[in-house]
Image (cartoon, helix red, strand yellow):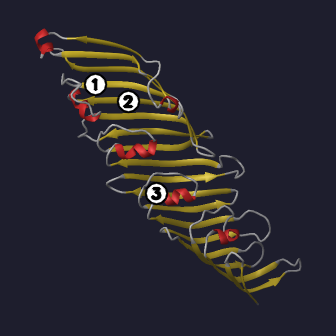
Amino acid sequence: DFDFHGKTKVGLDLSLSGNFDLADSLEPENIQAKLVFSAPSTRAARFLIFETIPEFGAITGKCDIHSTAGDPSLTNIVIQTRDENSIEANLNGGIAQFPLADRPNQGYNLEVSIQATEGAVLAKRVGLELPGLGPLDLNFKIEGSTQALQLNQINLSGGREDDVRIGGQGHMSFADWDRADPFETIELKLQVQSATTQLLSPWIGQKLPELGPLSSEAHLHTVSGQHRIDQLQIRTSETAPLTVVVSGSAEHITLLPELHIRGIELEANVSTDDIGKLNGVFSLKDEIPQIGPLQAQAQISGDDKNIVIDEVSMTAGKEELLLVNLSGRLGELSPANNWQPQNTSLTIQASSSSSAGLAE
């Protein structure tokens, strides 16, 4: 029998008790033990979990250790963290093979739940900068092995009904942890809803015109070893003064060490029953006359550093009053030019079947 209790300089309080036999090779066998620990900070217990664990506050944990011969297993794992900024994490389950030597663990079966009163605080702990988000709830299951880790049954929800809301469901797997991008495969359905368009401005770093509520969805997945986005759709509500639908894909997404998006291919469709409504959308003083409906389409391509809007086609107004047709290239937009169009080439044609109508 053995009963060990110790405390480290950083406050990790650890107790290990139980019994085991020594085989002829002096390897322990027939292990029956219990581990209990607590610490004032998550990082103080990192060598019991993993070295790069983020700081989630005070931590407590326990598990049972069993083996007859060979690598022991960990069962009845219960780990909880509580943070003064209202971040709470819970981990429960077991690990089928937990070698005492320097070999990878096998057979993870762990359920994880993380809740935060403010999602931006939690994001900052894992190295992400997000605007104020509100409550966040994340649940997933850890399976696989140390060298082929899987996060399955991912379910993410965050935000508030009167603000921005985010959601995500799916799974992902990891391979070589020494790679800059350790993700092996990603399979996620993503959603974003915003109560107003302008609430999204802090998220993209660009002021937006007010189009009312917005919703978007996308499929982030791995195809032939490359992460990409498909089935992207962004749309306004049916009651919006200007109806906008953007759909398409991005063929190459890099998540780590920095986010990069390449191969953007989008189609945008815009319509309204009266072009005069654009005065309210863009805060103009009746500069746009009420000449009738607007229909417009455009192709958007490029990457996260440079966007090209081309193949623009717009029709506005009525023939008996004033009919305006516009076509061509809106130009290149980039953060270096404050997203203002460069190299624009547009053709505009205007006609009216009635000079009296035009005079009005």
Residue at 24% x, 34% y: name it. 280
SS class, disc 2 = strand
The residues tagged by marks 1 and 2 sit, at their Cα atoms, a distance apart of 11 Å
**Mark 1 belongs to which amino acid?**
Gln
- The image position of residue 95, as x and y in percent, is 65, 69
Picture disc at residue 295: 1
Instruction: Verify CB contact (< 8 Å) between mark 3 and mark 1.
Output: no
**Mark 2 belongs to which amino acid?**
Ala
- Structural crowding at the residue carrying mark 3, measured as other residues with C-alpha within 10 Å and reported as few (<14), some (14–19) or many (≥20): some
- Structural crowding at the residue carrying mark 1, measured as other residues with C-alpha within 10 Å and reported as few (<14), some (14–19) or many (≥20): some
Residue 78 visible, this angle: no
Which quadrant of the rendered structure holds the N terminus? Answer: bottom right
Picture disc at residue 188: none
In the displayed structure, does residue 17 sit left or right of residue 87?
right
Residue lying at the far front in this picture: please name it: 285
In the displayed structure, does residue 117 sit left or right of residue 67?
left
- The image position of residue 29, as x and y in percent, is 79, 80
The residues tagged by marks 3 and 2 sit, at their Cα atoms, a distance apart of 28 Å
- The image position of residue 215, as x and y in percent, is 35, 44
Question: Is 113 rendered above or below residue 124?
Answer: below
**Mark 3 belongs to which amino acid?**
Leu
Q: Which residue is mark 3?
A: 156
Q: Which residue is mark 2?
A: 268
